[in-house]
Amino acid sequence: MSGGDGDGGSRVHERSRVMHASSSASSSASPSMEFLKFANHEVIQELMTCTVDELERRALEVEQKLSLVEARSIDEHAKECENLIALKTDVDTCEEILQSMELELGAFADDLGKISSEIRGLQTQSEALKVKAMNRHAAERALGSVIENLTVDPLMIQTLVNGAVEDEDYSRRATELAQKLDVIDNLRRPNARGGATTVLAASDVAPELERLRVKTCEKSWAFLYGQFHALKQPRTNVQLIQENTLAKYEPLVAFLRARGPEVYWEVKSTYVDVMGKVLKTALASYVESLKRVTLPPKAYIALGSKKRSPGGTNEISGVSALSGIFGGGASGAAMSGDDAGEHAELFSLRSRAQTLRDAETGPPFVLHQPSDRVQQEMREYEELFRSAHRLLIDTATFEYAFCEQFWRGEKDMFEKVFAGPLTVYNDFVAQGVATASKDAIGLLIAIRVNAVNRRVMSRRRVPALDAYFDNLNMTLWPKFKHACDEHVKSLEQMKESFEPNPEAPSFIVRRYANFVVALTTVAHSSFESSTVVDDEEVNIATQVDLVLDRMRRALFDCVTNKLCASLRESPKRRSAYLVKTFDFVCTTLSSLADIKDEQTTELATLHFFEEKFLNESAAFVTHTMHERFPELEKLDGDVLFDATLDALSAFHRNWRQSLASTHADCVACFGTSDWRAVELFRRCVTELTTRYTTIVDRGYVAQFGDEKASQLAEYVVTKPTFTLEGNRYTSKSNDRLASQ
């Protein structure tokens, strides 16, 4: 161990000596370069200041320190030799372990190669199995339903042969049977090559399915026949039975439609026959019951006629134009000329407007049997017309919806079922208009009710009654126009010998004004639920406006040429009568101004008569001025001084008396309690003042010179004088009007 240490020490000492020699050689080789490199270092500068002895001493100290450090390093390295030998042993051991792991990993890689080959084989097998599974699923889909439908369940046979048809399970089994029969038909259908597909199982099961089909058709037909005939029992709620009972058996009807054509037509015929008679009987009974609550008809009177048409003639009741629908007695006796004006209410709408308000939402009237001993309110014909047709559209809506569901959209079923009820209603309407009815208001209400019913059915998306509504329009419109033509004709054919009542407008004018308001209100009425006006309502309003336009021309010609025929010799009285007449028409028609626009005929009529009222008022003032103040005619123009003096003096003497006569004329023509007398007198005073002051102010007096002008000025009446005198009369009239 010591020998080893000695060898190690000698080797270290030798290496140190060599290193020292090399360093000395290198340092001596280039001392100048080293000094120059570190010349500025503080240690070098310090050494440069030392003596040689000090430098040797310090060099010896440094060398001793280096020897100590080198010896200490050699000792530490000697101590770590054992650790280095152990580390080498560990490295050798790791190399052996890594070699064994390398051998194992090589074997594992070989095994993985074999496994990947096996996986590729499994993938190939999996794809093959997947193809086989898909083929088997396709075969199952193709044959599964066929096999299932070719298999007849004993429970299905038991249900269809011995089960009760009213059970829900029976309908389900019948649907299954239809599906199986469809499969058999598809299997027997020729293929693309022209030959039939042969399936032995289908040939075996087809006879059994056919026997089940025949049995099911037989039982279903018998059951439905009984259900249909049960609807004919008295006091049966047919709609309730249809909704809660018959609707459940729609699958049976579908089965018979598809698999029982030999009995399906008979099922349809039975339903059409039974249901048609039930509905026809019910609606006919309701229509017949309306006769008991119909008001007695009233005699017809034309717009320009003094008398009612006697009973038994072609001119029947105006208020009951369709009274034939509901029955009723004969028309009233003829009316004398004295009481002709008392029947303007025949041309008024009055409470008949309630029918329009109920047209869209009002239910049918509930009618009691005579045995119920219930006092029922008597009603006008248009109310019953609305009630009857409301029942019709409600019944048609329910039946149409049921046929759509029960008979699967066979539209001819509803048409066949409702042929009988529509016959009842065709007769119902035909009876009312067959006698050339002339109640234009009632006919127009019926036309509006028909339009409302069409709109209601359109919103319900039920087009079942469109043809009936069209036929009803074709029946009602000609009668309405004929009725209006009769009124126009009566005005055109009236004779001139007619004597007007100077105290009030003629009854013909009162009838006309009320008649226009009534027709306009009916034609242009709107409904709360109607946000958009449809084409039919626009057409109704347009047709009525054309009729009213013609009637307006006839009435104006009648009033101006015939009613005033006896007043031709007195233009002032004629103008006064026309003022009262036109004012009454304007006052009556003004109630329409709030609900109509300016495009409608009723407002055109109002504007027309307002213009005529203003014209005749001006004419009355002109005639009065001409009659009571003739002196103004002499002053108007170029005249001599003497004539002017005479005219002014005469006017100055007589104008107060003439003004009093003018006031008397206004009162005589219009009455003391009529505002028009005051208004027209005020206009006369205004016209008098305007004309007189215009003549004087334009220099008429001054043209004769100052001397003569001053002579004429003594007779000139001032404007305040006219105003004061006129106010004296008008204040008295205003006091009388205020006290009434």
Image: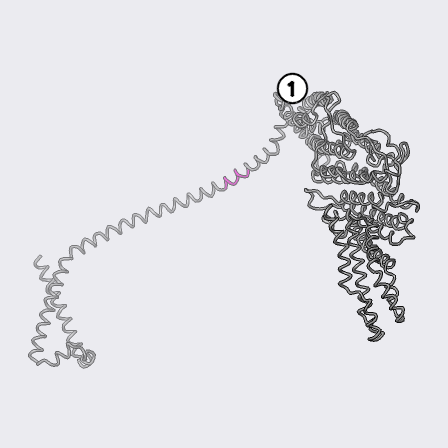
Q: Work out whether residue 654 or residue 426 is closer to the camera in this orientation and state it.
A: 654
Q: Work out whether residue 72 or residue 83 is closer to the camera in this orientation and state it.
A: 72
State which quarter of the image contains the C terminus. top right
Spot occupied by residue 64 in the image (x, y as percentages of width and height): 9, 70
Label 1 packing within 10 angstroms: few (<14), some (14-19), many (20+): some
Spot occupied by residue 615 in the image (x, y as percentages of width and height): 83, 56
- Residue at x 74%, y 23% (from the top left corner): 369
Q: Which residues are magenta?
A: 124-131
Relative to 8, is 490 on the left or the right?
right
Residue 726 visible? The answer is yes
Which residue is label 1 attached to?
Answer: 164
Spot occupied by residue 200 in the image (x, y as percentages of width and height): 66, 26
Q: Is residue 647 above or below residue 460?
A: below
Number of residue marks: 1
Q: Work out whether residue 543 or residue 557 is closer to the camera in this orientation and state it.
A: 557
State which quarter of the image contains the N terminus. bottom left
Q: Is residue 125 magenta?
A: yes
Q: Is residue 244 magenta?
A: no
Relative to 176, is 66 on the left or the right?
left
Q: What secondary structure do most residues of the magenta stretch adopt?
A: helix
- For the rendered model, the colour scheme is one colour
Residue 272 visible? The answer is no
Quarter of the image for residue 395 reads: top right
Quarter of the image for residue 700 reads: bottom right
Spot occupied by residue 217 in the image (x, y as percentages of width and height): 71, 23
Dot 1 amino acid type: Ala
